[in-house]
Image (spheres, rainbow, N blue to C red):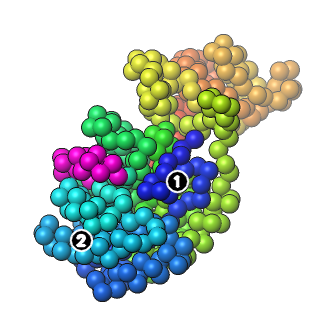
Amino acid sequence: MIESTIAGLKVGDDQPVRVMGVINLGSESFYKSSVVEQNSVLDAALKMIADGADLIDVGARSTWPLAQKISKEEERSRLIPAIKLLADLEVPVSVDTMFSDIADEAVLAGADIINDVSGFTADERMPDVVKEYDCPVILMASNKVPGDPAGIDAVMDSLERILKDADRKGIDPERIVIDPAIGRWTPEKLPIYDYETIDSLQRLRIFGKPILAAVSRKSFIGEALKKPASERLFGSLAATAIAVRNRAHVIRTHDVAPAVDAVKVSQRIRARIPAVRSGEFEAEMLDIKNLEDSRKMMTLIGVTGAGSRIMKNKTILYNILVKNLTATEALIIKQEMLARGGDAALPRDAVSHEIEKVNLIITGTQLQIERLINKIKRQVRDLPLVAEMLAELIQKKDDAVFLYSGYK
């Protein structure tokens, strides 16, 4: 089970999903209505807290690809006075910056959390600041520039590397929150990648860290609705509900009050994760549906690279419905699956060939299905065609273009 205490706030599977309100000081932002003037910072934060915000995130530099770039000094001049104004809030305050010297000043001025959208890649000194103050840190999936991983597999690989680097640099693993970099951080990141990431958010659970989802009014919502940022509230709430359903622990939002309502309802609909504790022992039901996630999870518990690569194809069970086979073809498939440790369900009358066409449910691991494919693609009747179909089916299961580009 995922459990952390972030700046005194409990975050995890058995806690309420936390809502992080955004104080945006960057006039270059893609969402102009979210920009807060310096003289309104405290009032804006207090209003968010009254609306139900559990944390406040303060940023002064827009990372929108089309935004006008500002200097580090401009970011500092906006950010530090705002942090000082919020130093005595009753909720934790996060500073959104990629620069270690600004983060240092912000923590001294009263910030509780550092939110580094570069995932420690923009400033090599940022881990030193986090370690010096022993403060919580939000690390976003990034490689060369903030948010550049495109697609959930790239996000997973990026976060795996970032967390390993953080561990080597002595960052307390209990103080890390991960962010999958939802949004068009680079021109190459198309909306399809955000749809895939939000739908696959639960995959990030293998890292054992709280998951932050920042979906508020972003471009993938605009692409679906054909509306500007100012008209994307309802789309944001839909994405928020799905992110919570898919195991987000923190929602970062410009619209606290409606987001709080969406979070409360969607969390009630989300089932709890089966887990048991007894003394020092723990057991948890894993919900892993991707082979590479199986490999990563095994590596994280100390399984060798070779061992995890061998084991991964045995970890995920598929149930595949195949229709309109002849009874003979269905029986051959069942025999081949039984020979490989899997099985297949078919009508009783198929055994006596009393019916001409039957439907079949094949049950087995990916390894067993792959071995079935290799066997029947060289056999008689239409079994080679069935083999091609099964291979295509497995390929489509993880194909983002197929899965998320079918709707207009």
Which residue bears the numbered disc 1?
11
Q: Is residue 118 magenta?
A: yes
In the image, which residues are magenta? 117-135
Residue 141 in the image, given as x and y percentages of width and height? 34, 49
- How many labels sit on residues? 2
- In this picture, is 275 found above or below 176? above
* Nearer to the camera, 55 or 242: 55
**Label 2: few (<14), some or many (≥20) within 10 Å?**
many
Q: Quadrant of residue 105?
A: bottom left
Q: Quadrant of residue 333?
A: top right
- Taking the spot 47% from the left edge, 35% from the top edge, the residue there is 293
Which residue bears the numbered disc 2?
80
Residue 290 in the image, given as x and y percentages of width and height? 51, 36
CB of mark 2 within 8 Å of CB of mark 1? no
Q: Amino acid at mark 2?
A: Ile
- In this picture, is 80 found above or below 12? below
